[in-house]
Amino acid sequence: MEKVMSNKLVIALYVLPSLLLIMGIIYMPIVLTGYYGLNEWNGIGEMTFIGLENYKHLIQDSTFWSSAFHSFELALFSGISLIGYLLIALVLSGKIKGANLLRKIYLVPMLLSSVAIAQLWMKIYHPTNGVLNSLLMSLGVDNPPAWLAEPSIVLLALFVPIIWQYAGFYILIYYAALKNIPESLMEAARIDGANPWQIATRIKLPLMSEVIKVTIVLSVVGSLKYFDLIYVMTDGGPNGASEVMASYMYHKAFRSFDFGYGSAIGFFLLLVCLVATYLIRKATASKETIQYS
Amino acid sequence: MKVATAPGYNSGRVNERKILQGTGYTLMYLGLILVALVQIFPLVWLLIFSLKNNQEIFNMAPFSIPAHPHWENYVNVWTNGNIAQYFVNSVLITAIALALTVLLASFVTYAVTRMRWKGRSFVLGLFMVGLMIPVHSTLIPLFSLFLKLHLTDSPISIILSYVAFNLPTTIMILLGFYYALPKEVEEAAIIDGCSVNTMFFRIILPMTSSVLATTAIINMIYNWNEFIFVNTFISSDKYKTLTVGVQNFIGQYTTDWGAIGATLMISILPILIVFLLLSDRIVEGIAAGSVKG
């Protein structure tokens, strides 16, 4: 048994291809992004080592800071919207008929490609023929906004389809966690006279704390690196009003062919994501972990 | 008297509470249904406008169903342009990447959970940390790597990237299942003289078929919807997948809403059909693979 199960050749055959793949396609590029960020480079020609010049430039680049600010706004919105998803999941996990069907319906947008969602919502937001403004006009609103062309509202307008896309996913996770809580605990609390609010806040939420932490990390980090819908729907516009870190990186590298500077942004994005993960984990760390009995 | 009023008083309170609970229940139920409608209505609208011509879209009420549905919108986009080619590319790339990912992930998970060797927890850690790396931070080095290897504008670069970035999630879903496999099966197989390979392919893989199906579906959804790699690496139409193809196609036909609607429907229908058939497994898989956001 021992001998067969520690056969070095078999282990190498089973593990090495995958290991080489993630080394070559995930880890090596991360290191290279860090290195390219120290160079001036147009992606094809010679690289010139310039030390921290790109990062000095980054600190003074107001477009970068406004795109970083937009990313943080998205992260904040996403974090707050988790409360709504949690409430929906709490209601859904009560004795609701058709809860299973409802959570499946909620999940449908999550299965669609970002491109399809983006194109669909561009049509929904269309200033004259979109379904949103058609409805608003039939309700008597004379000049409904051109949602994606107004710098002051474009970020919020983009956030709606992002919520639409991910709501079902978070509701599903919360719902699964709530269904995992043993019914006997709630029953005991009810016999002791606890009302539904007390049961939710004193029993259900503490038992879900691990799941809630994971979703905070997911939604915040996911928002910080968000790209797809924004790239298709506004491409960072109008006038940079919806530019985020990932789209700014993409524009610098693949439109302006400033691969060195783009890499510096990409490396910064990686650091922001890792630091955010660490900080959220630390801020939400509890001294004791609660176990399901 | 006392005995007679007490039950009456009590039942009155009970009734009142029941009515209150009933109203609360109805309100919550309506809330849940409202969320479901919000999730589903954009898609209903998409289906409806994919069957209209521009005149009907711009002049009729948004949710009115046309008297004569324009099914030819679908025929037109399928036959003119490259949608059929993109569709085939998406199917092939999705299927190949999926098969490779599930097989390689099974190898790794098997070696890490069932075999004995030094460094297995470190190797597993490498795969798990891969979950935290933002795709965008690897994009520039990957692009220049594939450029050097003459793999840009080749499906190989896409498949390798999909496999690498989906391995961590897939391994994570498989892990719990592999840890739970009974040791006795392997012991019996080894006593019977099985090699590790025979055991893996003849015994372990069939035993894990249900979780393999789950990971396959999750991989299918990710691969089918992926945008950024194809958009960055692939330039010629013959290798583009549906997400990127749809994006380019719609860019050319910005004014023909019916054609755009039909294109979007074609791109999301395969996923919707799979969801209708296998929704329970998808729900379970998304909950299990939830670390990927």
Image (cartoon, coloured by chain):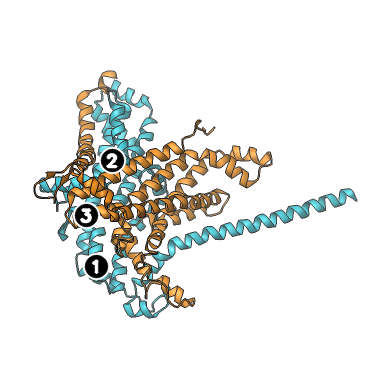
Chain colours: A orange, B cyan
For the residue pair A75 and B167, the one nearer the viewer reads as A75
Q: How far apart are marks 1 and 2 (CA)?
A: 33 Å
| Mark 1 residue crowding within 10 angstroms, few (<14) / some (14–19) / many (20+) | few
Pointer 1 or 2: first along the chain: 2
Q: Residue B225 carries which label?
A: none
User: Horizontal placement of B293 versus A136: left or right?
Assistant: left
Residue A267: quadrant of the picture: top left
Q: What residue type is labelled 2?
A: Leu
Q: Mark 2 lies on which chain?
A: B
Res. B97 visible in picture: no
- Is mark 1 in CB contact (under 8 Å) with mark 2? no
CA gap, disc 1 and disc 3 = 22 Å
Q: Is residue B8 left or right of residue B283?
A: right
Q: Residue B257 in the image: state x and y as whole percent.
A: 31, 73
Q: Where is residue B165 in the image (x, y as percent from the top left)?
A: 27, 43
In the picture of the structure, the residue carrying the numbered disc 1 is B251
Residue that numbered label 3 is attached to: A252
Q: Of B27 and A24, which appears nearest the observer?
A: A24
Counting other residues with Cα less than 10 Å from the Cα at mark 3, is it few (<14), some (14-19), or many (20 or more)? some
Q: Any mark on residue B167, and which? A: 2
Say whether residue B190 is visible. yes
- Alpha carbon separation for disc pair 3 and 2: 29 Å
Query: Are the residues under marks 1 and 3 on the same chain?
Result: no
Kind of residue sitting beneath label 3:
Lys
